């Protein structure tokens, strides 16, 4: 599954790349070149960040599942214990 940006995010990213080049590089970059650079970065480096996000989410979910029994545990056969306290 290829990574894709929404059209709005792509426009913002291209504008950000152009600004970065204007402010930090000796030569500015044009819109088409910035779009090409963005496409390269998304295809080449984007999967690294995507995979790390998936791994982080998986780790978080596994930790939550491991705690599930503690969070939703309900004592069985407690009717008589509660009844004894009511008297």
Image (tube, helix red, strand yellow):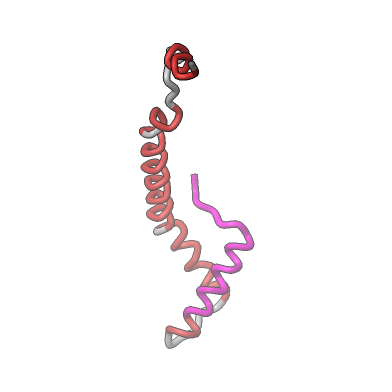
**Quarter of the image where one finds residue 71:** top left
Expressed as whole percent of the image width and height from the top left, the position of residue 15 reads 57, 74
Horizontally, is 44 left or right of 38 in the view? left
- Who's the residue at 50% across and 84% down the image? 22
Main secondary-structure element of the magenta-colored stretch: helix
Residue 7 among magenta residues: yes
Q: Residue furthest right?
A: 8
Q: Position of residue 47 (x, y in %)?
A: 41, 52
14 or 82: nearer the viewer: 82
Residue at image point 40% right, 59% down: 45
Q: Is residue 53 above or below residue 62?
A: below
Is residue 12 toward the left or the right of residue 56 in the image? right
Indicate the position of residue 62 as horizontal and vertical percent values. 37, 37
Picture coordinates of residue 30, whole percent (x, y) = 55, 78
Q: Count numbered badges in the picture.
A: 0
Q: What stretch is highlighted in magenta?
A: 1-20
Most extreme residue toward the front is 87
- Which of the two residues, 8 or 44, is positioned nearer the viewer here? 8
The residue closer to the viewer here, 2 or 33, is: 2
> Residue 41 colored magenta?
no
In the displayed structure, does residue 50 sit left or right of residue 4?
left
Q: Residue at x 58, y 68 (%)?
A: 12
Residue in the image at 60% along x and 67% along y = 11
Give residue 43's quadrant in the image. bottom left
Task: Between residue 13 and residue 79, name the one nearer to us.
Answer: 79
As displayed, is residue 28 above or below residue 73? below
């Amino acid at each position: 599954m290829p990574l894709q940006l929404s059209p709005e995010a792509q426009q913002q990213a291209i504008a950000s790349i152009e600004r970065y080049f204007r402010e930090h590089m000796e030569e500015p970059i044009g819109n088409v070149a910035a779009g090409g650079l963005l496409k390269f970065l998304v295809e080449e480096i984007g999967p690294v960040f995507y995979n790390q996000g998936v791994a982080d989410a998986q780790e978080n979910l596994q930790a939550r599942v491991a705690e599930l029994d503690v969070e939703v545990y309900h004592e069985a056969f407690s009717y008589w214990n509660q009844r004894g306290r009511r008297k």
